[in-house]
Amino acid sequence: MSGDIYLAAAGALACEKRLQIISNNLANANTDGFKMDQGYFKMINPADLPAQSASDPADLATSRAHLFWNNFSSYTDYSNGALKRTDNDFDLALVGNGFFCVQGPDGIHYTRKGDFTLNADGVLVTRNGWPVLGNGGEITINSTENPHKYAKFAVDEQGNVAVDGKQVDSLRVVEFAEPNRLTKVGNTLFKPPDAGAGEIKVEDVKISQGFIELSNVDSVKMMTEMIEVLRGYESYQKIIQSADETYSQAINQVGSLNG
């Protein structure tokens, strides 16, 4: 593959990857607690290219091929989404950095989505039934003396959980020194590369009861970026087509001269 076609193809593939990210963001624009992803790629730096030391041009092209590829990466934007008032006591929103901790079948997971509920045993759980963790483990709302009977469930700004005025636990809210090492595992859940790796206690977060955090996706901005990416992809396609036509003409002309 010629150098110019190779470069154009690399750019087109980078646009495809960026378009996939934008499409996923738009698909989750109305998903509570969703954190959008951003894509970026580093263009070629001539200073990084090796000296022309290979004796065989074909070997040189092969050895340098990876340097002409756009280094595309992505990261998660953890900025806060807007808060929506629901007046549901079991809806909790974090204002500031941090994650709620939930106990999954394969370990602790982390989320910003606080639309919790109670299971049949009176344990505070996520919508898929995973227990929400407090400093003492699972948070049980109902007392053993009067199961499923209580007058008021309250959570203050510091995350202290009280039932009928009596504190039963405090929500376990943590953050990470390197949040971009977290991996999305679906349903607005995150997991670190190693259990509990980098987990630190949050100091400056507040909890709003009766609110839910919305997605931080800006749909208008995403649509604008999508148009930009599509135009870039079309430009790369035109470059590939133009280069292909040029080489075809050159080959035909050389063939006719040799004939």
Image (cartoon, rainbow, N blue to C red):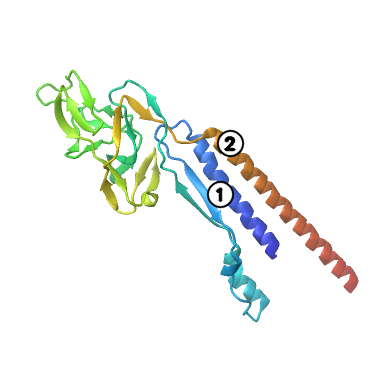
Mark linked to residue 84: none
| Left or right, 107 with reference to 220 | left
Q: How many marks?
A: 2
- Judging by the rendered image, the residue that carries numbered circle 1 is 17
Q: Residue at x 18, y 18 (%)?
A: 151
Q: Residue furthest top?
A: 151
Given the image, on which type of amino acid does mark 2 rest?
Answer: Met
Q: Write the residue at 56% across / 49% down.
A: 17
In 3D space, how far apart are the residues under numbered discs 2 and 1 (Cα atoms)? 16 Å
Residue 236 visible at all: yes
Disc 1 packing (10 Å; few <14; some 14–19; many ≥20): some
Q: Residue at x 48, y 33 (%)?
A: 29
Q: Residues within 10 Å of mark 2 (few under 14, many from 20)?
A: some
Q: The residue tagged with tag 2: helix, strand or loop?
A: helix
The C terminus appears in which quarter of the rendering?
Answer: bottom right
Point out residue 20 in the picture as x, y percentages from the top left corner. 54, 44
> Quick check: 59 above or below 218?
below
Does the residue at mark 2 contact the one at mark 1 (Cβ under 8 Å)? no
Under mark 1, the amino acid is Lys
Q: Quadrant of residue 89?
A: top left
Residue 219 pos. (x, y %): 53, 33
Judged left or right of residue 225, residue 133 is left
Circle nearer the viewer, 2 or 1: 2
SS class, disc 1: helix
Q: Quadrant of the N terminus?
A: bottom right
Q: Nearer the viewer, residue 221 or 21?
A: 221
- Closest to the observer, 35 or 206: 206
- Residue nearer the viewer, 22 or 200: 200
Q: Which residue is mark 2?
A: 223
